[in-house]
Image (tube, coloured by chain):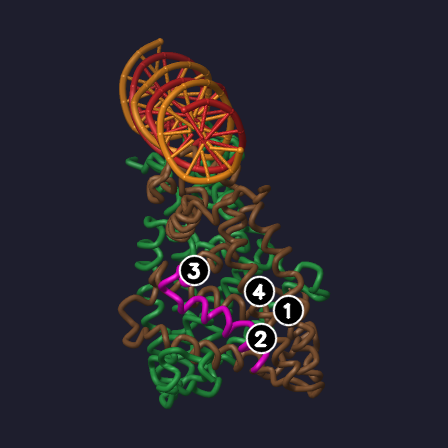
Chain colours: A brown, B green, C orange, D red
Amino acid sequence: MSQPVRPPAPETRDRILDAAEALFVEHGFEATSMRMITSQAGANIAAVNYHFGSKDALIQEVFRRRLTELNRQRLAALERLQADAGGAPLKPSRIVDAFFGTALELAADTEHGGHTFMRLLGRTYTEPNAFVRQFLAEEYAEVLERFLGALYGALPDVPREEILWRFHFMMGAMSYAIAGTDGLQLFAGHFDDADPQRLMPRLMSFLLGGLRAPLPEFSEVARKGGREAA
Amino acid sequence: MSQPVRPPAPETRDRILDAAEALFVEHGFEATSMRMITSQAGANIAAVNYHFGSKDALIQEVFRRRLTELNRQRLAALERLQADAGGAPLKPSRIVDAFFGTALELAADTEHGGHTFMRLLGRTYTEPNAFVRQFLAEEYAEVLERFLGALYGALPDVPREEILWRFHFMMGAMSYAIAGTDGLQLFAGHFDDADPQRLMPRLMSFLLGGLRAPLPEFSEVARKGGREAA
DNA sequence: GCTCACTTAAAACAGTTGTTTGAATCATAC
DNA sequence: GTATGATTCAAACAACTGTTTTAAGTGAGC
């Protein structure tokens, strides 16, 4: 009777999202026009505003449909770790793996757009579309809090401030590794072995090495004015 | 007599470059219009095409005027190291410092636009404007070759492939640390100590830790299908 | 005075932008 | 069949894009 009049999805909506995702990562948000999106999706120009309301809302939905799921998996992986440990402190490497390994798995999926999306996410970290910035901040708030808390517990001897910064650095290394490898090819011609399956262990070693590095020493002399005073 | 009829610089040109630099880092290349640039620079809209020829040429000049000098300093620092060592192998930490420390010094200069430019450079690594991509590749070619060569010599036991990847990761960590800190503020509210003077030692420790991390093991079992199989 | 190269100015160029409109089409329910 | 709601379509909207044109202003050398 009063069935929700919703045949599961007319697929036009999804074709638009896929096209937008691919075009955004290639040209950026601003340089990608609605006409580029709809023509690649085989849809009418008015379809975007019909299904999403505006270009900004489309951008947001491109992120929402994947990021929510990614962060859900990250939290699930962390909770699995904590359940298995039964109160014992976690190994930092497992925590890092739960966060970055989960993302790298999505980045390794080239068949369902996961790779495309992770490239887009990586480049968006430095592309401050106001709309997306706000959305990412909200979407990441809980995940960051939980993972930082886990790391604080796993590394009780390391100042929390330092863990925070190093998590920041790790996100940068990962983003750039994914987004920069096939974008700006600074290292083109140098790579002999760019096997994407080996990216994960390579990046993991690097991230853990950085996380466990000796703590920096802050020379008070260099605090203000630094070298130019000499 | 035949003095080149060039009063040093009418400064309109420089005002445009400064305005463009600041607006590009805030909105990106595409979202920054010529009218935004010229109005912020207090110049006429036609001035850009008069002084630079086109928007693409302006973008290129924004990078050229700073990047050429930065890479010159990097090479000079490396040559100084090699001269001081007199043939002896260099310490990896000194090489890393010559490359990343030099860049971080520029990023610490908030008075002459160095900070702004480094943020722009960081975000550009993942923003593939075709024009800029080509330019950066050319501008970096020699520097990368020299620094990679130095690292190969300093770390003879580490496979070159691995050094290459780790240099890649290091560039990502630095770019994100600079561009992402005041752009997308994912970690807003977490940082108690965001003293920019301490960013350098913090990042340096992280980078060196990553560079010297234990080498990854490539398990052939995990090549296809990965971790979920377990 | 005048010339000449350089720089700035206002206005217009054709093309593209995101968005809206109102009619046409479609699939389903009765 | 008709009625109903969801979806698609071509066309148009005003606003903005990078670039060009043409004229006016500038200051030095003669």
Q: Secondary structure at mark 2?
A: helix
- Residue beneath label 2, please? A77
Which is more N-terminal, label 4 or label 2? Answer: 4
**What residue would you read off at disc 1?**
B198
Left or right of B126: which side holds A191?
Answer: left
- Pointers 1 and 2 within a single chain: no
Residue A139, compared with residue A86, is above or below; it is above
Q: Residues within 10 Å of mark 1 (few under 14, many from 20)?
A: some
Q: Nearer the viewer, mark 1 or mark 2?
A: 2
Q: Amino acid at mark 2?
A: Ala
Q: Majority secondary structure of the magenta segment?
A: helix
Residue A204 in the image: x percent, y percent?
Answer: 48, 78
Between the residue at mark 1 and the residue at mark 2, the CA separation in whole angstroms equals 33 Å
Looking at the rendered structure, whether the residues under marks 2 and 4 are on a common chain is answered as yes
Tell me which residue sits at (57%, 79%) in the image: A211
Q: Is residue B136 above or below residue B164?
A: above
